Image (tube, rainbow, N blue to C red):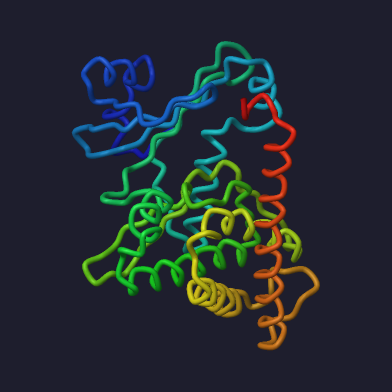
């Protein structure tokens, strides 16, 4: 499955041209692991990324029998996310191996977003040492609040929501543009509970807790609540209303939950250091 104009560029009679790209130096390994390898492709049609989801173990093959493979899930999620007005990557092709009745290794090809880098890398390099202009800090907080609010307004939770799964590009005027990536962990429901929103925001907050100032947090929550109220004709949060007073109360509740989650994480880490564990050793 691929967009028509890229079929000949990406496939031959044997499938994806991954072996050809590796042999010619057009495929560079960006990330490699037991379950997934990510390549950056430099092709005649431009820059692309290829995710190779591995299904060498029985549990992963069983998952592919019970539901679509991860490449297909991410293809569908990207189109759903884009339909909500949330910037994300453009999927251009899906490929998979089917040695029997069950899908094995599967592949997702996406178009590169030029000059965009992971948000966590940018924050550690620029915001952590306060070297970035204040307009950049303000823009990131506002755009991040808007992006997450649109996600939640669409009744979608990203269960791996962190700064590494968001790309950023800073314009000449200091304005930040953000893209949500790595979409196979997203799930959509009919309504979201306040507890689901709290937990999702705490995942994102975990990385920023040591660097975000009170002003950064205020800008984020104001942008989040403003977008949530304007995008949703009916609130996606189960059992809540969207009056100005209730939204302020929700904002304070979310902020308090995130702060408490950080302390719980620190206490959990302390207990690991005290008792010792195999990973620590």
* Relative horizontal placement of residue 158, taking residue 1 as reference (left or right): right
From the viewer's side, name the closer residue of 23 and 94: 23
The percent position of residue 161, horizontal first and vertical second, equals 57, 51
Q: Residue at x 53, y 71 (%)?
A: 217
* Relative horizontal placement of residue 158, taking residue 27 as reference (left or right): right
Can residue 95 be spotted in the picture?
A: no
Number of callouts in the render?
0
The percent position of residue 230, horizontal first and vertical second, equals 56, 79
From the viewer's side, name the closer residue of 260 and 179: 260
Q: Residue at x 30, y 63 (%)?
A: 131
From the viewer's side, name the closer residue of 138 and 75: 138
Q: Residue at x 56, y 19 (%)?
A: 104
221 shown above or below 62: below
- Identity of the residue furthest to the left in this view: 44
Quadrant (top left/top right/bottom left/bottom right) for the C terminus: top right
Can residue 72 be spotted in the picture?
A: yes
179 shown above or below 65: below
- Identity of the residue furthest to the top in this view: 99
Q: Quadrant of residue 196?
A: bottom right
The percent position of residue 213, horizontal first and vertical second, equals 49, 70
The percent position of residue 183, horizontal first and vertical second, equals 53, 45
124 shown above or below 175: above
């Amino acid at each position: 499955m691929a967009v028509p104009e890229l079929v000949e560029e990406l496939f031959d009679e044997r499938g994806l041209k991954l072996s050809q790209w590796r042999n010619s130096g057009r495929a560079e390994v960006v990330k490699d692991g037991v379950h997934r390898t990510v390549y950056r492709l430099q092709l005649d049609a431009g820059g692309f990324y290829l995710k190779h989801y591995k299904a060498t173990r029985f549990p992963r093959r069983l998952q592919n029998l019970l539901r679509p493979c991860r490449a297909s899930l991410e293809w569908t999620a990207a189109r759903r996310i884009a339909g909500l007005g949330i910037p994300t990557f453009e999927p251009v092709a899906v490929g998979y191996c089917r040695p029997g009745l069950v899908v094995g290794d599967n592949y997702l090809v996406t178009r590169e977003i030029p000059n965009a880098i992971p948000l966590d890398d940018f924050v550690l390099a620029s915001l952590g040492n306060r070297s970035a202009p204040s307009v950049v800090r303000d823009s990131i907080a506002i755009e991040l609040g808007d992006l997450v609010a649109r996600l939640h307004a669409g009744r979608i939770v990203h269960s791996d929501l962190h700064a590494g799964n968001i790309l950023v590009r800073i314009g000449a005027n200091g304005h930040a543009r953000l893209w949500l990536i790595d979409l196979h962990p997203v799930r959509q429901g009919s309504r979201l509970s306040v507890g689901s929103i709290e937990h999702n925001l705490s995942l994102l907050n975990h990385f920023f807790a040591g660097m975000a100032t009170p002003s950064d947090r205020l800008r984020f929550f104001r942008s989040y609540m403003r977008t949530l109220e304007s995008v949703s004709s009916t609130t996606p949060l189960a059992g809540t209303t969207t009056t100005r007073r209730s939204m302020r109360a929700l904002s304070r509740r979310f902020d308090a939950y995130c702060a408490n989650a950080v302390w719980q994480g620190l206490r959990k880490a302390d207990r690991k250091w005290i008792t010792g564990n195999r990973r620590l050793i």
